[in-house]
Image (cartoon, rainbow, N blue to C red):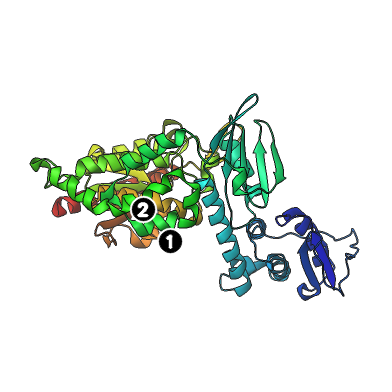
Amino acid sequence: MHHIALDAPDDFEGWRDVARRLVLADVHPADVTWQVGDAPGDLFASDALPVIEARGAVFTVPRAFVDLAQSAILHRDNERFALLYALLCRVRARPGTMEDKADPLLRRVEALAKTVRRDIHKMRAFVRFREVAEEGGARFVAWFEPDHHIVRANAGFFARRFTTMCWSILTPDVSIHWDGEIVREGPGATRADAPGDDPVEALWKGYYAAIFNPARLKTGAMLSEMPRKYWRNLPEAALIPDLIAGAQQREAAMIATAPLAEKPTGRQGNAETVWAALRGDAMGCTRCALHENATQTVFGEGPLNAPLLFIGEQPGDQEDLAGRPFVGPAGQLFDAALAEAGVDRRQAYVTNAVKHFKFEQRGKRRIHQTPQAGEVQACRWWLAQELDIIRPRIVVALGATAARAMLGKAVAIGKTRGAAIPLDNGAEGWVTVHPSYLLRLPDETRQAEERARFVAELHMVEERLAALV
């Protein structure tokens, strides 16, 4: 029996080094106990690790396992180290394990990782800094209570996001401090160590109350994204109960005071306010890691009463720089195809399934990379809000990523294109190829054929829309 003591609860590097040595010595998972620090261990366990010969002391695992382990190890589950070691042994013995979604051990570890990723997102969303005067300048201090050991893993995000600020984030287990150059760690703190409020919060509360829209209130969705446990850290949360309680009365008052001429179609003005607020929120989106390298969020654009809505995949290099969808080479081909099909782009709303540019840097060039399913899922929230505001009659998904975002599952373009698909929101969905697909075709004859088919499908959509409106 081997007893392993790691330096910290999030010590991935230490766990990886020990786990590799144990695996190479063929130590069974049941023969290892794990702990953090100097807590009492197994009375009969040995602290000595197996001596591994240098020859042949190398093996590889899929990158997916490393990514999964780096997240799951941050969980507070006391069994996480043992579960990961057992999974490592299984992956080494059966390399296809990471693709076996029915494997109960893999599913359990993935559940840990999913919970950790959600906690990381919540920290990024709900940390609120308060200004504290210090000798030599101001420091911004925040208090947060994470569910898991995510603070060190999140430090880089806050250093990149608030580079010019001197800040501290205090948590019960560990605190992190940024002085503009390096991140330092400190001991855990208590809520009493954090400031109570600052003068800016009064202005923020006034703004929050002013933009609160009772007509768009969805309490269930709000609580899902912003659970009550985080409210005590948010200055605006104190206003929420009263705003919810008065939502129906305020909505009725808005309707009663609307000009008579607007009442049949009076949602347009409200839609503009809601869309502008939504777009403003999206500019600071951190729902997935793509925001870290992208220049900016690229939100949708077009009439808010558009009967036709197009979903692309993600911004490209030029869209990322311009902050507008479909302005690069694929966008120019798209515009030309729309015109040929008799569709006026100015009357359509155009957006993307993913709002940040995903790329790989190669020298001075940024090479497009296809978004992963998790990134598409993270961005579906923004798309759902856009669809709810626009309420189009027809939604056209351009490519497989857009189709996944529209339908909530992966589909084959060849089997679904060119036919209407009923959507849950009452609209009609259509699937076709992305314009960039046409640009990538090397054969000119094939490119002409596929372009003609693309234009024909756009024309079918236009004819169908004329029949619906």
For the point 45% across and 44% down, the residue is 235
Tell me which amino acid carries mark 1: Ala
Q: How many marks?
A: 2
Label 1 sits on residue: 410
Pick the front one: 400 or 162: 162
Question: Quadrant where the N terminus lies?
Answer: bottom right
Pick the front one: 244 or 340: 244
Q: Which mark is residue 378?
A: none
The x and y percentages for residue 455 are 28, 46
> In which image quadrant can residue 110 be found?
bottom right
* Neighbours of disc 2 within 10 Å: few (<14), some (14-19), many (20+): few
For the point 41% across and 42% down, the residue is 282
For the point 37% across and 50% down, the residue is 240
The x and y percentages for residue 398 are 36, 50
- Name of the residue lying farthest toward the left: 260
The x and y percentages for residue 36 are 76, 60
Label 2 sits on residue: 241
The x and y percentages for residue 446 are 39, 48
Left or right relative to 344: residue 159? right
Mark 1 and mark 2 residues within 8 Å of each other at the beta carbon: no
Examine the rendering and report whether any part of residue 230 can be seen: yes
Left or right relative to 346: residue 88? right
Left or right relative to 323: residue 162? right
- Quick one: label 1 or label 2, which is nearer the N terminus? 2
Q: How far is disc 1 from disc 2 in space, using C-alphas?
A: 39 Å
- Kindly state the secondary structure of the residue where label 1 is placed: loop
